[in-house]
Amino acid sequence: MSEELSKDIREAFIRQRRNLMLVSVALFLAIGAGFRPEQILIFGSKITLDNPDYVTYGIWMLWGYWLVRYIQHYNDLEDVEWSQRYAQEMNYRILRWAEDRAFSSYSEEYLDDQYISKFSGQPSFKPNGYGEPPWSYQIDNSEVVYDHSKNIEAWIKLKPYDSAGQAHNRILIVQPLSGSRLTFYSALSHLYVARNTRLFSEYALPFILAFVPLWFAIYKMHPLEGVFFCD
């Protein structure tokens, strides 16, 4: 997509967001405050409305139209910053947890001659040129991987060093994530983006405000006294 077309799509998205916000406020006033114009002015002529209630029905139609338009233009955006920032924060939390697990799994007490034999392909005895424990290790690479079943795993590659500074073969540690941990990290990532960036007011808040009139209309039809309002 060209830069000019991308700019046009974003400008159209901003217009639909503005229209949705305006019609949502008008609908809330029509439902909550009983706003009913009895006359409207069209091309300098006054037109009397015999049934002002139909004005509200017309606003509902506009509300539905601009809500759909807003969703469509939101999906057309190539650079939805919320998704990008959310993915970055999610990956950061997953990898931080997986790296901590990797370090705790391979503490110095486990990096001995048995480690050399089992993981590095080296003999269990220490040949010339290889230092003595304690061992140290660094993270060589880490990434979040999706398998064929859409499960998420963290792959951590550790590179161990002996006391002489000799590097040994890397260890691949696969850390699968449970559904509960993914849900927890997903909620924290969304909250982080909402609290620390402007993206909540640009993308999510219009959705919330748009559904306030709908919620209020449902309440007017089925009031829950003492739950939302106190008489």
Image: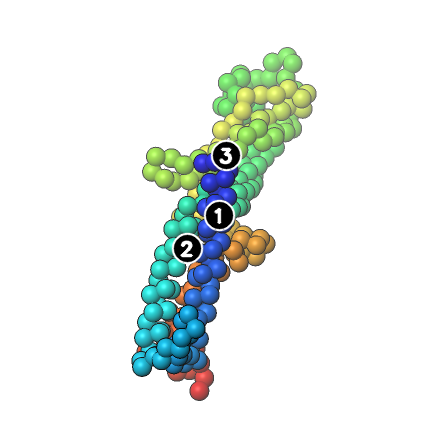
Apparent side of residue 105 relative to residue 72 in the rendered image (left or right): right
Q: Residue furthest right?
A: 164
Q: Which mark is residue 209?
A: none
Q: Residues within 10 Å of mark 1 (few under 14, many from 20)?
A: some
Q: Measured along the vertical axis of the image, is residue 150 above or below residue 111?
A: below
Question: Which residue carries the number 3 mark?
Answer: 143
Classify 14 as above or below 126: below
Q: Is residue 73 above or below residue 208?
A: above
Q: Is residue 188 visible?
A: no
At label 1, which amino acid type do we have? Arg
The image shows residue 204 at horizontal and vertical percentages of 47, 57
Mark 3 and 1 residues: CB-CB less than 8 Å, in contact? Answer: no
State which quarter of the image contains the C terminus.
bottom left
Distance, label 1 to label 2, CA atoms, is: 11 Å
Along the line of sight, which residue is nearer the eye, 156 or 91?
91
Residue at the spot x=64%, y=12% of the render?
Answer: 128
Residue at point 49%, 23% (across, down): 118
Q: CA distance from mark 3 to mark 2?
A: 35 Å
Q: Residue at x 34, y 69 (%)?
A: 58
- In this rendering, does residue 102 appear at all? yes
Alpha-carbon neighbours of circle 2 within 10 Å: few (<14), some, or many (≥20)? many
Instruction: Single out the mark in the foreground, 3 or 1.
Output: 1
Q: Earlier in the sequence, mark 1 or mark 2?
A: 1
Residue carrying label 2:
70
Residue 179, given in percent of the width and then of the height, sits at 40, 48
Q: Secondary structure at mark 3?
A: strand
